Amino acid sequence: MEKKLPKVFANKVDKNAGNNENVFYSDHDNKVYDKIEDKVNSVGAPKKNINQKINDIFNSPNYIYKADVTIKLKNETITKRIVGRNSTHLITMENELIPISDIVDINIK
């Protein structure tokens, strides 16, 4: 009861198809590639901006009321315990206001 199935025809691919690259970039300038590299980290994942990092800290399962963070400002690096935020500032445990516009990078300790 063996049935022979018909053979499948497949064309040979003898040229390099770069059509997705041509359509997406539409221009092969180095400027386009530089902009894309600026938006991803070394692993290839998109870089997060400061607001996304702050939201991740406040939405993490480890955050209950306060979080110990290392904040890299424009002119110094500080370690603080943050308890909240408003639209323009982070609020620390000591009632200090740290402007979000001055923050270069923020990491949880």
Image: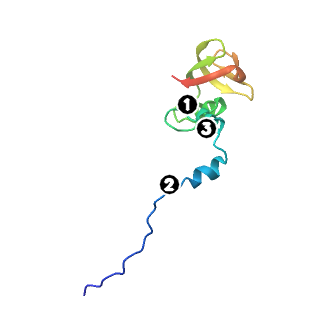
Q: Nearer the viewer, mark 3 or mark 1?
A: 3
Secondary structure under badge 1?
A: loop
Residue 52 vs residue 58, the one in the foreground:
52
Residue 97 vs residue 74, the one in the foreground:
74
* Disc 2 target residue: 16
Residue under the image location 61 percent in, 38 percent down: 33
Residue under the image location 53 percent in, 56 percent down: 17
Q: Residue furthest front?
A: 14
Q: Nearer the viewer, mark 2 or mark 1?
A: 2
Residue under the image location 64 percent in, 22 percent down: 104
Residue 91 vs residue 33, the one in the foreground:
33
**The quadrant where residue 10 appears:** bottom left
In space, the residues marked 3 and 1 are separated at their CA atoms by 37 Å
In space, the residues marked 2 and 1 are separated at their CA atoms by 51 Å
Q: Which three-letter amino acid code belongs to the residue tagged 2?
A: Asn
Q: Residue furthest top?
A: 76
| Disc 3 crowd, CA 10 A, few/some/many (<14, 14-19, 20+) | few
Residue under the image location 43 percent in, 65 percent down: 12
* Disc 1 target residue: 63
